[in-house]
Amino acid sequence: MTITKTSVTFFLVTILAILMSNNSVVAASGPPNCKAQCVPGKYGLHECIYDCIVAGYDYGTCNPNPTGKCCCAYEGHDR
């Protein structure tokens, strides 16, 4: 009886751990769509996010690279 209780407990703890670990995984579906040039004071993060949402994306961000493009992407949704 002890072996059965131990086995069932181990099984339930394993399932619980698997379920909890999968909740933190969020994958974007598809590559981001980068368009406009981010220019501080003219076209910044707020304008980028707004334009991305209007275009049907979930969010947008100004990439901190030399080109500084506004990239729109979906956040964990299958489209």
Image (cartoon, rainbow, N blue to C red):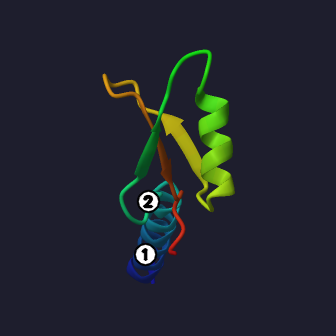
Separation of disc 1 and disc 2 at Cα? 31 Å
Q: Which residue is at a point 43% across and 73% down the rendered structure image?
A: 6
Residue 30, horizontal then vertical, whole percent: 38, 64
Q: Above or below — where is 66 with respect to 6?
A: above
Residue 2, horizontal then vertical, whole percent: 44, 77
Q: Above or below — where is 10 with respect to 20?
A: below
State which quadrant residue 42 falls in: top right
Q: Which residue is mark 2?
A: 28
Q: Which residue is mark 1?
A: 11
Residue located farthest toward the left when viewing the structure as drawn: 66
Q: Which residue is at a point 63% across and 62% down the rendered structure image?
A: 56
Label 2: state its secondary structure: loop
Q: Residues within 10 Å of mark 1 (few under 14, many from 20)?
A: few
Q: Residues within 10 Å of mark 2 (few under 14, many from 20)?
A: few
Label 1: state its secondary structure: helix
Q: Is residue 63 left or right of residue 44?
A: left
Q: Above or below — where is 73 with respect to 37?
A: below
Q: Which residue is at a point 43% across and 75% down the rendered structure image?
A: 11
Q: Which residue is at a point 64% across and 46% down the rendered structure image?
A: 51
Residue 43, horizontal then vertical, whole percent: 59, 27
